[in-house]
Amino acid sequence: MRWLPLLLLLSACRAQELPPDYAFLRRGSVAELRQVALAGEGYARMLAGWRLVEREEVPLAERAEYAWRYALFLEGARAFGPGWEAQAAWRVAAPLLEAARDPRAFSAWERLLPEEEAVAALLRLGAGERLWESLFRGRAYEALLQVLPPGVRPELRAQALFRLGRYREALPHYQAWAEADPRGFLGLGYALWRLGRREEALAAFARYPHPEARYAQGRVLEELGRVEEALAFYRGSTPEGLWRATALLERLGRGGEALPLYLELARTPSPYADDAALRALVLAEALGDAEAREAAWGLLEGGLALLAGKAPKPPPLPPPSPPLPEAARVEALLEAGEEDFARGEARYLLWQRLEAWPHLVPLFYRLGLYREGIRAAWPTTLAYPRAYRAWVEAYALKEGLDPNLLFALLHVESRFDPHAVSPTGALGLAQFLRSTWADVARMLGEPPADPFDPEASIRYAARYLRWLLERCAAFSGLEEVACALTAYNGGIGYTLRGIAREGGLYAFLRFQERDEPREYLAQVLAAYAAYRAIP
């Protein structure tokens, strides 16, 4: 017990090191929290109000205001990490605002759609156009169908029924929409196509003069085996239509016709542009067309340019940014050992002073907030941190990898977020599925480690990438890397079978059945090029 007074004294001294608002937060009395919530600064003001939300001695309207303010902050900050989910804050704010008869309650509940409680609340609070639009945007289609009066807003009813899979019911409403707006014919065509009524779908699409409709006509005609007609519609349609046209032409042995379409597609601002430029280069070389090859080479950019032997442009430098005086609060919190407060303050500053991101992003990296820092700094050199550098370089060296390649892979997989979880269940920095994680553990001769441990994730990623490179040893240089990276995303079986089926790596990259591995390869190679270009 003789140490207790000393511990209390040390604690008090530490509190004195904090900025005053945070010292009040640490003590946490209602009076002090209200003082910070009403007149404080930065994140401390937000957090003080949030801590008062559940204090019933505080007036309801005041608590509702604090909850609204904090939920807006989380929504704007778009932070990653437990406790920073805006939806959870809106679930607190919405009923408080409604109980306080605050007109902002509708907007708060709207953010929680299509949750049942939110739907019920909007039906209580709203009516007419605002309600209908909110239910539609919030994907509360069943509720929308119940409240939408007959004959009113047929475009909303038609699209709601379509998205519920009730295509036959949607038809008369698409027809009513089309009478007033030709866009209705596009939806009508898709509904008819889903019902197997292809000729009627073609007729509907023909009444909407737009590239999207030409693409849809091409798809239906291709499905009917009317390839020449499909090709005619794909030309002059969307980038996706051009991509399908080039594939059909190549499959028919008409590479000379495909080549100018690839070059046309390479000039569009679409996700297919880099793939089209690479394919045009490969095809031009095969056809001996020097002029087309030169054009394709000039259009080739990004990660796929690196694969072709062309160094892409390095990322631009961040713009100059004057010092931000408010950042001293983040530094003071870090010096006081209050990293959670420091993260909140940094996020608040970026939310309020987005133009100051070049000054703030290094602070984000010091705080381990790589995902958020990369997002703010994109696409400049500052968006390519060498996170966990000691581990990345050590395990890359152990497995005979270029550390820049391992940095690039982790950058694309998780933006260096060790807690990342994908919709498909991939975990951690290197985004392993549990089955693959267990496979790598067996390669290493150990029980599976924690996939959320950043060092373990880097170690497993290095080992697995080396194993994939060994499976791709039929290639060399960046082609071997391309094979391994595609396998990292799509699976080694998928990749090697596809290469064998198509007769080569570049043919597989063009004709593989999935879009994701192709885009993934371009992203990792682009990051690899960036890391190689940045000292």
Image (cartoon, grey):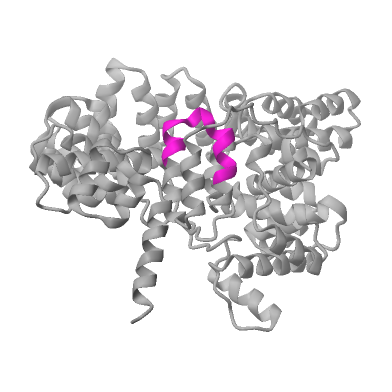
Residue 216, position as x, y percentages in the image = 49, 31
Residue 316 image offset from top left, x and y in percent: 70, 30
- Magenta region: 348-363
Foreground of the two, 385 or 90:
385
Residue occupying image coordinates x 34% and y 75%:
4
**Residue 359: within the magenta?**
yes
Q: Residue at x 14, y 46 (%)?
A: 95
Q: Quadrant of residue 258?
A: top right
Instruction: Give whichever of 359, 308 is nearer the camera.
Output: 359
Residue 102 seen anywhere in this rendered image of the structure = yes
* Location of residue 260 (image quadrant): top right
Magenta stretch secondary structure, dominant: helix
Whether 294 is drawn above or below 66: the answer is above
Whether residue 90 appears in this view of the structure is: no
Residue at image location 43% in from the left, 52% down from the top: 17
Which x, y percent locates residue 268? 64, 25
